[in-house]
Image (spheres, rainbow, N blue to C red):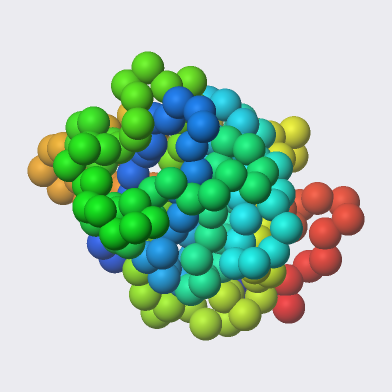
Amino acid sequence: MDALADLLNEARARGALFHQSILAPPWSLRFLHGAPLALVTMVRGDAWTTPGGAAPVALRAGDIAIVRGPQPYTVSDRAGVPPQVLIHNDDHCTTPTGEDVSQALTLGVWTYGNSRAGEGLLLSGAYQLPSDVGERLLAALPPLLVLTQECWDCPLMPFVAEEVARDEPGQQVVLDRMLDLLLISTLRAWFARPEAEAPA
């Protein structure tokens, strides 16, 4: 077994937090769910992601970010936009002042946002427990890893975006396995870059 396969062997999502957000600017989402590992991508539009207190990093349409938790992170349409919505878990969202806006932002199955016609489409998935990822993999990853669209060609993404909006029998299991596949695809492409160091 190669080193990357050995690291990824323990990754198996169980009850993954998955949702898509349809957004019209200005927007800024602060993720407080404390997940050990999250994947974030802009299906449409561009954004900035800010892990913890670090500097914002651009996230263009088609790029994918892996964010290592459990520290909070922010995704916004422009760098420096103060958070407007705090996402505590899969179905609980508040304003910074504590007002519950979960129902107001619900647009459909696993779909949230401030406008059905919004030009931005954010897709995110998160592992709930460190044991779902593996301590060795978490220790090997930086706080934020962004893989640009130029570095990978992921045929899974259109399928993932379609599946997230469905509510059918066994859907959670489908989403769990798709999160695993996205993580594997992203890290394979990351370590395949010429300048990448092989995982230990």
Q: Is residue 187 above or below residue 161?
A: below
Q: Left or right? Give the position of 53 relative to 113.
A: right
Answer yes or no: is residue 8 visible. Answer: no
Q: Left or right? Give the position of 15 relative to 152.
A: left
Q: Nearer the viewer, residue 3 or 83?
A: 83
Which residue is at the far right? Answer: 195
Q: Nearer the viewer, residue 3 or 77?
A: 77
Q: Left or right? Give the position of 151 relative to 171.
A: right
Image x and y of residue 148, in percent: 71, 40
Q: Is residue 158 above or below residue 67?
A: above
Q: Quadrant of the N terminus?
A: bottom right
Kindly indicate the quadrant of the structure image that contains residue 129.
bottom left
Answer yes or no: is residue 110 visible. Answer: yes
Task: Give the mark count.
Answer: 0
Q: Nearer the viewer, residue 65 or 195?
A: 65
Which residue is at the far left? Answer: 169
Image x and y of residue 187, in percent: 63, 56
Image x and y of residue 167, in percent: 16, 37
The structure residue drawn at horizontal position 46% and vertical position 55%, both measured from the top left corner, is 30
The structure residue drawn at horizontal position 66% and vertical position 34%, both measured from the top left corner, is 60
Q: Nearer the viewer, residue 115 or 163?
A: 115
The structure residue drawn at horizontal position 82% and vertical position 59%, both measured from the top left corner, is 196
Q: Quadrant of the C terminus?
A: bottom right
The structure residue drawn at horizontal position 67% and vertical position 57%, both measured from the top left corner, is 145
Image x and y of residue 133, in percent: 46, 72
Which residue is at the far front? Answer: 97
Kindly indicate the quadrant of the structure image that contains residue 34.
bottom left
